[in-house]
Amino acid sequence: MTERKIYTKTECYNIAKKYRNRSDFRVKDWSAYIQSKNNGWLDEISPSTIPPLTYEKCYDVASKYIDYSTFRENECSVYGKSIKTGWIKSFTWLKKRSRDLDAKINYVYAYEFESLKSVYIGRTMSLATRKRNHLKDKKDSVYKFITENELNDNDYDFILLKEKLTVKESQYFECEYIQKYKNDGWSLINRVKGGSIGSPIIKWDYDKCMEIARSYSYLKDLSTDYPGVYEKARKMGWLKEYTWLEYFKPKEIYTYEECYEKAKKYKTHNQFYVNDKAYVTFAKRKNWYKDYTWLKNKEHDSIIEYDLHGHFIALHTNILNEFGNVSGIFNCANGRIKSSNNRIWRYKEDVTDTDGNILNYIDVNITPSYYRPVVQYTKSGDFIKEYPTLKSTGFCSSSILDALKGIKTIYSHGYLWKYKDEVLDVNGTILQHIEPRTNKNNKSIILYMTNGDYVREYKTQTAAIKDGFKRSHIEWVSNHKYTTIEGLLKYKALWVKKSELIEKYGEVPIKIDPLSLI
């Protein structure tokens, strides 16, 4: 196989002078770059500081190219600067690249993993783009091979086998080198058969992707409607330019008035979050949350300072003004960490007795959650009793805490449990009735035949899957995602959530109309 060239320090220096920065040096002359790095020459021959790009510099660099694509692939930083400043409009000689099958612009290359006797053979028109995809795209076969075998930069070599070829010539030499490596005992990591080429028409270029992306507000919608545009933009690194796209798409869309009216029902941020989390999340995404100025923040309440053994030190009524960095104090008070600044911190309501007096000593091994007042309800949501702490309930504290957090179970000892501050109305009075909690991960679903006849009830979706039904079909039908009767009846089974049937009919009917699921 082709031997790796050994560079001297002078040769590496002369090569590095061709490039503006280390990134270009690394991408375009990988072998010289890695040898400079391994020998400790990099700081000397290629300074990391980059001079600012001026219009004249961008103009001179752009004048070397005849089309936008080649300019962008070979001079990423200059191209990006020209786009942001609008200078590229004055580079009138640049044209959109059309794929000429007879143009000698193709390369054949190899990634050799000599220690594993494995190789990747490829062909491309743009070495810079292909190198970037191989080393950064998680779906790429070279990237996967490097990751799975835990290899580093020194464990492989990039070899340029042939250059300045037409498409047909590059196909021929790619197949020839694949066969040559096979005969020499190398194993190929290529997933696609050698000699294959893509379409001669570039379907998604920079301008087309940008135009389509501007018609969307959410990244999820773009990836669903135009997966080709999304994938092209992701691979080429254009997604970071689509700054108007929001990554988060809420399941429900609310108006400003709806969120505002919901927020008016509560006095504290915690109450609003616990009871209407969806509205809180949506309001924060839309930057409306700052308008809810009447909501109190629990982190501004009094905080008690204890030493590491649990002995009382001081009461702080305005912690934000007394200390500079308070994130550690709040994390400790919330139970996320054990201590901060060699002190233990607790919210006042977490360390007061039944008479409202601050405890002079606390057990440092007990998390703050055990000190919060809790309220006991029946399974139907009717008030029973209030307790000042978890330990005062007389039941297993850890079991109640799991129920409060929704871990493993939603009940403890046959009762519903709530923190007191979660079930207060606007007047600060404990609610006498609350809506019973439901286990969102354990909803019953009903199976019907395609003619609407009842078959059976499954307690969980997992139980239905174990009987051979497909998860995707169950979710699509039960969430009413099918818009045609043909799609609905494709798998000869209909699925309905039991809660929907109870709400609509008051019971589970023995027959339903399939059209009602569309």
Image (cartoon, helix red, strand yellow):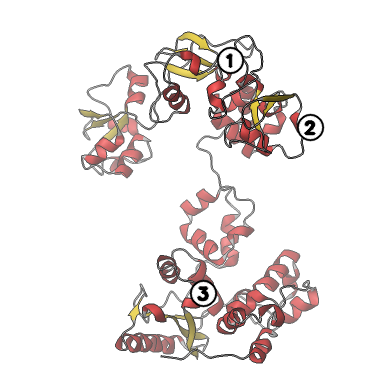
Measure how far apart labels 3 and 2 are at the Cα level.
Answer: 50 Å
The picture quadrant where one finds residue 93 is bottom right
Q: Nearer the viewer, mark 1 or mark 3?
A: 3
Q: Residues within 10 Å of mark 2 (few under 14, many from 20)?
A: few
Position of 425 relative to 246 (above/below): above
Task: Give how far apart the Cα atoms at labels 1 and 3 are.
Answer: 59 Å
Toward which corner of the image does residue 359 lie, by quadrant? Answer: top right
On-image quarter of the C terminus: top left
From the viewer's perspective, is 375 left or right of 58?
left
Task: State how far apart marks 1 and 2 are (Cα).
Answer: 30 Å
Residue 346 horizontal side relative to residue 132, left or right: right
- Residue receiving disc 1: 424
What is the three-letter code of the residue carrying label 3?
Asp
Q: Quadrant of the N terminus?
A: bottom left
SS under mark 1: loop
Q: Which residue is mark 3?
A: 153
Q: Tag 2 or tag 3, which sits nearer the N-term?
A: 3
Q: Residue 276's x, y, as percent? A: 55, 26
- Above or below residue 387? Residue 46 is below
Mark 2: which secondary structure? helix
For the residue pair 182 and 450, the one nearer the viewer reads as: 182
Q: Residue at x 70, y 83 (%)?
A: 45
Name the residue beneath numbered marker 2.
322
Q: Earlier in the sequence, mark 1 or mark 2?
A: 2
Q: Residues at badges 1 and 2 in contact (C-beta under 8 Å)?
A: no
The reply to whether dot 1 and dot 3 touch (C-beta < 8 Å) is no
Picture coordinates of residue 428, whole percent (x, y): 63, 12
Residue 92: percent from left, percent from top: 71, 77
Residue type marked 2: Glu
